[in-house]
Image (cartoon, rainbow, N blue to C red):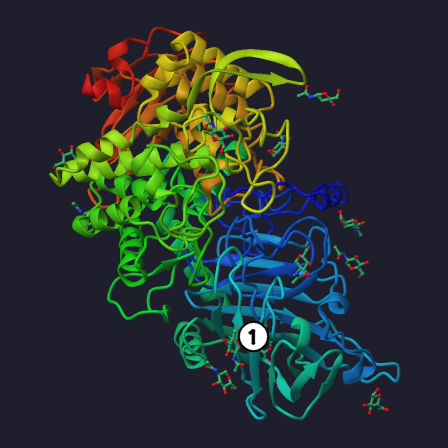
Amino acid sequence: MGLRRRNWVFLFAQLTGFALGSHQSPTPAPGHDVLRYINPLIGSNNGGNVFAGASLPYGMAKAVADVDGQNTSGFSTDGSNVTGFSALHDAGTGGNPSLGNFPLFPQYCSEDVLDNCNFLRATRAVHCLNDSVVAQPGYFALTLENGIHAEMTTTEHAALYRFNFPPATAANGSELSPLILVDLTDLWKSRQNASISVDASSARIKANGTFLPSFGAGSYMSYFCADFAGASIRDSGVWVNNRGGTEPKELFVTRGFNNFYLEAGGFVRFGRPGNGTVNVRVGVSYVSTERACESAQREIPDPLGGFDEIRRHAESAWRGKLSPISIQPGGTSEDLQTSFWSGVYRAMLDPQDLTDENPLWESDEPYFDSFYCIWDSFRAQHPFLTIIDPNTQSRMVRSLLDTYKHEGWLPDCRMSLCKGWTQGGSNADVVLADAYVKNLTGIDWEVAYEAMVNDAENEPLEWSYEGRGGLQSWKRLNYIPYLDFDYLGFGTNSRSISRTLEYSYNDFCLSTLAKGLQKEDYVKYRSRAGNWHNLYKDDQTSFINGTDTGFVGFFQPRHLNGTWGYQDPIACSALASWCSLTSNPSETFESSVWEYQFYVPHDMAALIDLLGGPDAFVSRLDFFHTSGLADMGNEPVFLTVYQYHYAGRPALSSRRAHSYIPSLFNASNNGLPGNDDSGAMGAFTVFSMMGLFPNPGQDVYLIIAPFFEAVHITHPTTNKTATIRNINFDHTYKNIYIQKATLNGRRYTKSWISHDFFTQGMTLELTLGDTESDWGRHERDLPPSLSKLLR
Ligand SMILES: *[C@@H]1O[C@H](CO)[C@@H](O)[C@H](O)[C@H]1NC(C)=O
Ligand SMILES: *[C@@H]1O[C@H](CO)[C@@H](O)[C@H](O)[C@H]1NC(C)=O
Ligand SMILES: *[C@@H]1O[C@H](CO)[C@@H](O)[C@H](O)[C@H]1NC(C)=O
Ligand SMILES: *[C@@H]1O[C@H](CO)[C@@H](O)[C@H](O)[C@H]1NC(C)=O
Ligand SMILES: *[C@@H]1O[C@H](CO)[C@@H](O)[C@H](O)[C@H]1NC(C)=O
Ligand SMILES: *[C@@H]1O[C@H](CO)[C@@H](O)[C@H](O)[C@H]1NC(C)=O
Ligand SMILES: *[C@@H]1O[C@H](CO)[C@@H](O)[C@H](O)[C@H]1NC(C)=O
Ligand SMILES: *[C@@H]1O[C@H](CO)[C@@H](O)[C@H](O)[C@H]1NC(C)=O
Ligand SMILES: *[C@@H]1O[C@H](CO)[C@@H](O)[C@H](O)[C@H]1NC(C)=O
Ligand SMILES: *[C@@H]1O[C@H](CO)[C@@H](O)[C@H](O)[C@H]1NC(C)=O
Ligand SMILES: *[C@@H]1O[C@H](CO)[C@@H](O)[C@H](O)[C@H]1NC(C)=O
Ligand SMILES: *[C@@H]1O[C@H](CO)[C@@H](O)[C@H](O)[C@H]1NC(C)=O
């Protein structure tokens, strides 16, 4: 999903001198350690919404400082204030701020008087020292303006914090007691009700609460367990509003009349230890408080002395996940290498492995959460995981199928154990087809087929969070009508164009699986995959500010009776206004007719014919990318960078990719053009820099000139190493045009390659030059299109 930048984002961008260093670990990693090239702060400002804190790969525990500015994933380098430190987050999403449940906050209370403490979020908020932020895989640290230093690292289900309190005294010279509070809240104050209890002798704090998902329906419960180490306990208690007391030790809060929200929580005060350091071990769970405490004890047995070991464990987990890839930079700048490796890293933060943390059903299958949303992640992130972490990708697919089995539908967007809002198509279909054509193992394809048929045939009552709407029209008219008459289900009655295009591709994906499984209905779905034709209006023109763009023929909305409606082809682009589910819902979702015009991923040949042939198509694609119509900050644009391939002009895809990287995807804190969306932008960057871009759902990677002299990828299960190697590589990127290629030493003229390149460990050698050549231009060398295969 994309979140349109709001004005406040620009406002904070202006405030931000904030060059926060990212490689200032107290224990710097040695020489060529790949972790040196990971900067979790890329995209931490200007709407990237990345998760900048400590996490394991796909980890459930994600610890970071939460701020009161851009806080969708907790932290931002926008210069806003720190309001807490919490251990559940999502990564890169749009929507409301996600999770951030039960934040801790360390402080001194003036004159050591409890009523002088800043309990409330708004009053305790404090800036961190500029340049104090350290963000590295498995580790996050900063110093608050008041001198309190906070460090954190994580295991699967627990976080370990190390708070250092500088010496502080009251007016009469006596030492102040450090206080750490727990707030019964989350980032967007969605808490419905919550309980807390503080154990008087051990000071263990247990909490539970009911919260709302940040982009979905229903509610979820979250559980918390904190233990303190390194300091003597002075006293403890609870607080409500801005008053605290050492009695009682338990509290229940709910929402009052008019949804009234009461701030409340618990606290512990300590005798300040000689070195000023208080460690806090926090276990989190979606199952029970007992589970949260058990996980914490098991995963962090030594909360006092174990910090460095936990951190090293997290670092080596990341090194392991990154180990399939190696690059030969060939003079490529450190910044570009950092963009690359950080993109790889971000692609493995979410979805989160919540196996054994799913309270909704009993199962031996894996459970992953935070598919947020598949509309974003099917395009590059999941295909990327299929290459470098096929075992995990296979477990994610199994989790999707298990969710289908227990909830009746494949998810399209899912977070915090809830169903998230569907953006258009039934995009899990694409993930399943992609896994199928790439031979992922361990998946029950019969169940996958059944789940996809369910999406294609059965309309749910609530298609706002599962399945598809308008299926009667889809089957009868072969398009989704503008202002459909749909009495079967509920959903925002909009997006008729984008849904028609997405459902067409979803049905293509189903036909792929059906054919593979020798189901006869593959023919039916292959035919429905052509439904996009029905919204093509061949005399539609497009004007910008009264000037004719000169392009004729666009997708348009169509009524039930077959007559045409109208949506300005530039509407919903950056040149017009933003369109989403709730803001200005239109016939295209978060993207214009101009952008959706290119979304026929399975039959680009037919689309190119309709649009007047390869040359007309290329000039249309060029106009799109140079007029401000292309929204590089949102995922539907990804494939358009590469679609020149289908017009026999792979050189132009290469030029286009090189024009966007690094100008819009770079290593700065504002180095992403939009929400990272669980690493979707990261995966786009990585694929582009590797020189191969997937057409997801198909066994196709489009080849361009890579950004490195060579890239090696060792397949984690076959152990074979695929190599992309360049002759005449030039790190100033004048030579970005492929002149000729060999695959395993034999001449290779196709502009695309299939997945066995990775599984079989082949070697693709590209000879580069500074002008477009004939390579990949011949008809027989184009990537596949459905209508050509049928011809
Ligand atoms: C720290 O950065 C913020 C945000 O850019 C700025 O407003 C503030 O003046 C800086 N503080 C110092 C001490 O440099
Ligand atoms: C998160 O940001 C929003 C909007 O900037 C703000 O209203 C909210 O209080 C912030 N949350 C925290 C925990 O500061
Ligand atoms: C940060 O806190 C200061 C007061 O300490 C306040 O003036 C400012 O508005 C806060 N910033 C944000 C983004 O809330
Ligand atoms: C100093 O003041 C604190 C409270 O402000 C009080 O608890 C403490 O006993 C005082 N110490 C001395 C030595 O007077
Ligand atoms: C807490 O809130 C949830 C959601 O509003 C509700 O279902 C539940 O009954 C409440 N629990 C208590 C103990 O009030
Ligand atoms: C939440 O905690 C309270 C108080 O400790 C307890 O009574 C209640 O049963 C807990 N709720 C759940 C669902 O665990
Ligand atoms: C602080 O001192 C305690 C003993 O009082 C020790 O156990 C702990 O490891 C020290 N912490 C640090 C960060 O040095
Ligand atoms: C359209 O015209 C307005 C007003 O003259 C101008 O501000 C805007 O930049 C123009 N837009 C484009 C895309 O040319
Ligand atoms: C078709 O339906 C549209 C929308 O309801 C209506 O405006 C139009 O008049 C109808 N046209 C015909 C020919 O029935
Ligand atoms: C980095 O990317 C951002 C976001 O796309 C862009 O605004 C910025 O200009 C880029 N910076 C450089 C130095 O290219
Ligand atoms: C791949 O390497 C791993 C670790 O060395 C080994 O356990 C595994 O059997 C190898 N797989 C194949 C297919 O050779
Ligand atoms: C998948 O397996 C089939 C059957 O063994 C094989 O024909 C095909 O080439 C494989 N595809 C890939 C991408 O490895």
Q: Which residue is mark 1?
A: 280
- At 22% from the left and 44% from the top, the residue drawn is 440
As rendered, which of 408 and 733 lies closer to the eye?
408
Q: Can residue 639 be seen in the rendering of this structure? A: yes
**Could you tell me how many numbered marks the image carries?**
1
Q: Residue furthest right?
A: 171
Estimate the x, y position of residue 728 in percent, counting from the top left: 40, 14
In the rendered image, the quadrant that contains the C terminus is top left
Question: Ligand 12 shows up in which quadrant of the image?
Answer: top left
Estimate the x, y position of residue 703 in percent, counting from the top left: 35, 22
Is disc 1 surrounded by few (<14), some (14 to 19) or many (20+) residues within 10 Å?
A: many
As rendered, which of 507 and 121 lies closer to the eye?
507
Horizontal relation, residue 717 to residue 384: left or right: left
As rendered, which of 230 and 298 lies closer to the eye?
298
Q: Quarter of the image holding residue 193? A: bottom right
Q: SS of the residue at dot 1?
A: strand
Q: Can residue 438 be seen in the rendering of this structure? A: no
- At 57% from the left and 83% from the top, the residue drawn is 196
Estimate the x, y position of residue 556 in percent, counting from the top left: 47, 26
Is the C-beta of the residue carrying label 1 under 8 Å from the nearest atom of ligand 7? Answer: no
Q: Quarter of the image holding residue 143? A: bottom right
Residue type (three-letter) at the residue carrying disc 1: Val
Horizontal relation, residue 149 to residue 571: left or right: right
Estimate the x, y position of residue 746 in percent, counting from the top left: 20, 16
Horizontal relation, residue 122 to residue 643: left or right: right
